[in-house]
């Protein structure tokens, strides 16, 4: 349900969802081989921390935004400054987070 809402919000903002994953192994495979400009990552994916996926994205130089219902708890300390969308979020929050990622990537 959340992924459908996210897809709708992204479309409203002019973006296209390139891929989605509901399990850590799927997310890792997509992080390693996927073609996308930015990743939107739930901090906890089916009960597993998203940290291994973040490590792959950092290695590839792919920017990311965290999504969490638990504030910054669960975000690796080294990535504590990464944009965070607090659940539930609206399209304007998503737009701000994506703008923050774009600004960071431009530096």
Image (spheres, helix red, strand yellow):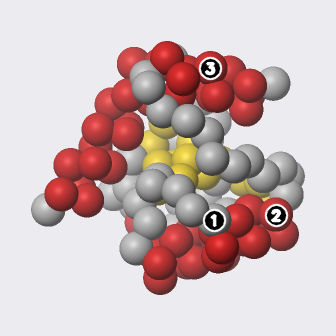
Which residue is labeled 1 in the image?
Answer: 34
Q: Is residue 85 left or right of residue 70?
A: left
Residue 75 image-quadrant placement: bottom right
Can you name the residue that lies furthest to the bottom here?
Answer: 59
Sooner in the amino-acid sequence: mark 3 or mark 1: 3
Secondary structure under the numbered disc 3 in the rendered image: helix
Q: Residue at x 33, y 57 (%)?
A: 81
* Residue nearest the observer in this picture, 11 or 50: 11
Label 2 – label 3 distance at C-alpha: 22 Å
* Residue nearest the observer in this picture, 8 or 91: 8
Q: Position of residue 32 (x, y in %)?
A: 64, 76
Sooner in the amino-acid sequence: mark 1 or mark 2: 2
* Residue nearest the observer in this picture, 22 or 35: 35
Q: Residue at x 40, y 73 (%)?
A: 61
| Label 1 Cα crowd, 10 Å radius (few <14 / some 14-19 / many 20+) | few
Label 3 – label 1 distance at C-alpha: 21 Å
Q: Are marks 3 and 1 in contact (CB under 8 Å)?
A: no
Q: Quadrant of the N terminus?
A: top right
Secondary structure under the numbered disc 2 in the rendered image: helix
Residue 86 shows up from this direction: no
Q: Position of residue 56 (x, y in %)?
A: 57, 78
Which residue is labeled 2 in the image?
Answer: 26
């Amino acid at each position: 349900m959340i992924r459908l809402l996210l897809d709708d919000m992204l479309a409203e903002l002019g973006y296209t969802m390139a891929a989605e994953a509901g399990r850590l192994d799927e997310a890792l495979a997509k992080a390693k081989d996927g073609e996308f400009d930015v990743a939107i990552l739930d901090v906890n994916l089916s009960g597993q921390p998203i940290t291994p996926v973040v490590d792959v994205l950092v290695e590839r130089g792919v920017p990311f935004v965290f999504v969490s219902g638990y504030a910054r708890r669960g975000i690796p300390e080294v990535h504590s400054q990464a944009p965070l969308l607090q659940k539930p979020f609206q399209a304007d929050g998503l737009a701000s987070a994506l703008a923050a990622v774009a600004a960071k990537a431009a530096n």
